[in-house]
Amino acid sequence: MAGIRPAPEEWRRFEEPIRRFLDAGLLETDGGVLRLTGRGVLLSNEVFQEFITP
């Protein structure tokens, strides 16, 4: 629940899904920390699968 602090290259690599989830209200940022919102917790599997690389 505390969130993560992505490295600059991670922000760039995952820019599109991060922006999509921020716009959808599933993620929020605060001082460089990225974390799930309350709604994001409920849909966390859908969020996480976007960041798992094959």
Image (cartoon, helix red, strand yellow):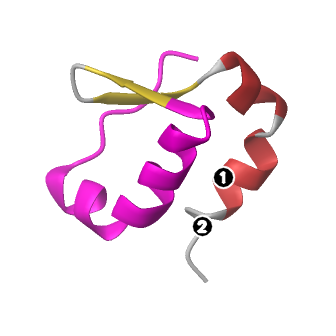
What residue did someone put label 2 on? 52
Callout 2 secondary element: loop
| Residue furthest to the left | 8
Residue type marked 1: Phe
Q: Nearer the viewer, residue 9 or 19?
A: 19
Residue 8 higher or lower than 23, as above or below: below
What residue did someone put label 1 on? 48
Residue 49 location, quadrant: bottom right
Tell me which residue sits at (16%, 53%) in the image.
Answer: 8
Crowdedness near tag 2: few (<14), some (14–19) or many (≥20) residues, C-alpha within 10 Å: few
Magenta stretch in the rendered image: 1-27
| Residue furthest to the front | 23
Q: In the rendered view of the protein, which quadrant contains the N terminus?
A: top right
Q: Nearer the viewer, residue 17 or 45?
A: 17
The answer to whether 40 appears left or right of 2 in the picture is right
| Residue furthest to the right | 42
Residue type marked 2: Ile
- Residue 13 in percent (x, y) is at 31, 69
Asked if residue 47 lies in the magenta stretch, the reply is no
State if disc 2 and disc 1 touch (CB < 8 Å).
Answer: yes
- For the residues labelled 1 and 2, the Cα–Cα distance comes to 7 Å
Q: In the rendered view of the protein, which quadrant contains the C terminus?
A: bottom right
